[in-house]
Structure formats: structure tokens, C-alpha cells
Amino acid sequence: MKIGIGNDHSALEMKAEIISLLKERGHEVVDYGTNCGDSCDYPTYGEIVGRAVVNHEVDQGILICGTGLGISLAANKVKGVRAAVCSEPFTARMARMHNNCNILAFGSRVIGVELAKMIVEVWLDTDFEEGGRHQRRVNMITEIEERWE
């Protein structure tokens, strides 16, 4: 799988650990930055990764900022993105299984590296339960998005 990753200045060390994990698991990683410790604006990277996902440049995305909130809010403004902030594995599993989220976000100032790795692994190992009520609800989310074009 090809995974795009983006972050702000608060997440450089955590991103490096996540990239190593992804590569160990055999994934191709596209690093959209930042790769600088200077203060930067997380919406830039949320949008870049969001666009990469919906344009099929990558299969999935991972975003990291201080809390995961701001960068995921920016990504969710890109039509077709379903980004979820997950601070523990159960939410990550449900984000994939029930909501078919295509971007995972978390906060470098909220969780530690080992927990972040667990969250990533659960998220990647979980498939969407296609059909039924979950598909209907994902379709409803898409319909809301389309009404605001």
C-alpha cells in the first residue's frame, strides 16, 4: 500500500518513527512534510495529504500535529476525505470498519510513539465492512458533502 504522511513542526520525531514502522510492514511512504523544525501551518499539510488521497496519488493518509485536530480539520475540507483523529486503537478500528476513513490523524502532544504505532497498525489492519448500514451512512456523509459544492 502507498501511504502519504504529513505533519507540522511538533511531530517530526513521531513521523520518523511512523515512517519506519510503515516501511517495516512493506508499505511505500510518501512524505509530504514538513521536514523542518521551524513553526509551520498545519492546514497546509492537511490539505496536501487530503488531495493526494482523493487524487489517488496514495491509497491512505496519516496526519500528525500537536493534537491531530487542526490538521484533520484541514484535510476534511477536501471533498472525499474522511479523516479521523484517533488517540487509542478502538477508535482507529471503528474509523476504518464503520466509517471507511481514508486518513488517520493523531497528536504528537497527546499520545506517545508506541501508542501511535499501535493505532497505525490497527487502522491499517482493519477493513471497511462494506454494505449494509455502514455503507449507507458513508453514502449519507458523501451526500452532505455534495450538497455544499
Image: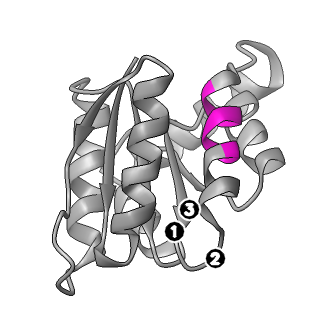
Q: Position of residue 11 (x, y in %)?
A: 39, 69
| Residue range corresponding to the magenta coloring | 118-124
Residue 68: image tag: 1
- Residue 61's quadrant in the figure? top left
Mark closer to the chain start, 1 or 2 = 1
Residue contact between numbered discs 3 and 1, judged by CB atoms under 8 Å: yes
Q: Which residue is mark 2?
A: 110
> Residue shown at 50%/38% (left/top)?
142
Q: Which residue is mark 3?
A: 106
Give amino acid for label 2.
Answer: Val
Q: Quadrant of residue 111?
A: bottom right
Q: Nearer the viewer, residue 102 or 17?
A: 17
Q: Residue at x 39, y 56 (%)?
A: 15
* 62 in magenta: no
> On the rendered image, what quadrant is the N terminus found in?
top left
Q: Are marks 1 and 2 in contact (CB under 8 Å)?
A: yes
Residue type at numbered disc 1? Gly
Q: Element at badge 3?
A: strand
Q: Secondary structure at mark 1?
A: loop
Local packing at callout 1 (Cα closer than 10 Å; few below 14, some 14-19, many 20+) is many
Left or right of 106: which side holds 78? Answer: left
Rendered residue at 20%/52% (across/down): 48
- Residue 135: quadrant of the picture: top right
Residue at image x 76%, y 27%?
Answer: 134
Distance, label 1 to label 2, CA atoms, is 8 Å
